[in-house]
Image (cartoon, rainbow, N blue to C red):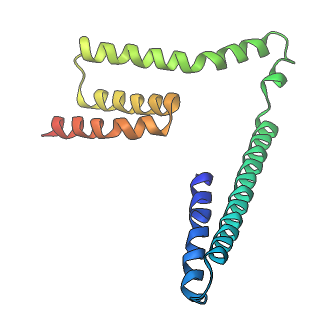
Amino acid sequence: MLKKLASIATGGLGSLFFDVAKTYFPPDMSEQQQQTLKLAFEKAEAEKARAMDSAIVEAEQALTERITQLEGSASDLLRIPLLGTLIIFLRGCQRPLWGFATLYLDFKWFSQWDLDEQQQTALIVINVLVLGFLFGERAIKNVMPLINDFIKKRDA
């Protein structure tokens, strides 16, 4: 999101400024002067973009540090002799466990189970949550039209 804001804030400003300057500067401006001015605007735009990128990196690092301070890190868990190692292992197993469990539920749903409407809705919600957790926002955006079509056809 921060990168989108940065691109909106800096994208194309150099050429926009040059077009405005070209409109209001004297018409007898030489080609070399125009190129020098355009280069100066593009340089200013690049410096602004570099500053925005640097600010984004700093903000992401600060957020990561803050999360580490509040939640701790895996190295903190290793201080607990047996339980810490177990927690790290279980935390690493979480994504595959949820993914395979949802895959199993979907297989049963489509092959054997005869579910009522409430149970089907619950499985759809579980699928959306697991897809979002495992694959992120893009997966949900790609799958939601299919789910909406499925629900519309089912209700019709």
Q: In this rendered view, identify the residue nearer to me: 122 or 139.
A: 139
Instruction: Name the residue rendered at 65%, 74% in the picture.
Output: 32
Q: In this rendered view, identify the residue nearer to me: 149 or 20.
A: 20
Relative placement, left or right, of 152 versus 61 is left
Q: In this rendered view, identify the residue nearer to me: 96 or 126.
A: 96
Q: Position of residue 7 (x, y in %)?
A: 58, 58
User: Residue 37: which quarter of the image?
Assistant: bottom right
The mark tally for this picture is: 0
Q: Residue 110, relative to residue 31: is it above or below? A: above
Q: Residue 9, relative to residue 144: is it above or below? A: below
Instruction: Name the residue rendered at 12%, 40% in the picture.
Output: 156
Relative placement, left or right, of 104 versus 75 is left
Instruction: Name the residue rendered at 78%, 23% in the picture.
Output: 74
Q: In this rendered view, identify the residue nearer to me: 17 or 63.
A: 17
Q: Position of residue 48 (x, y in %)?
A: 71, 63
Relative placement, left or right, of 53 versus 151 is right
Instruction: Name the residue rendered at 37%, 37% in the picture.
Output: 142
Q: Is residue 146 something one can see in this rendering?
A: yes
Q: Position of residue 26 (x, y in %)?
A: 60, 90
Q: Is residue 112 something one can see in this rendering?
A: no
Name the residue furthest right.
Answer: 79
Relative placement, left or right, of 130 versus 124 is right
Name the residue furthest left.
Answer: 156
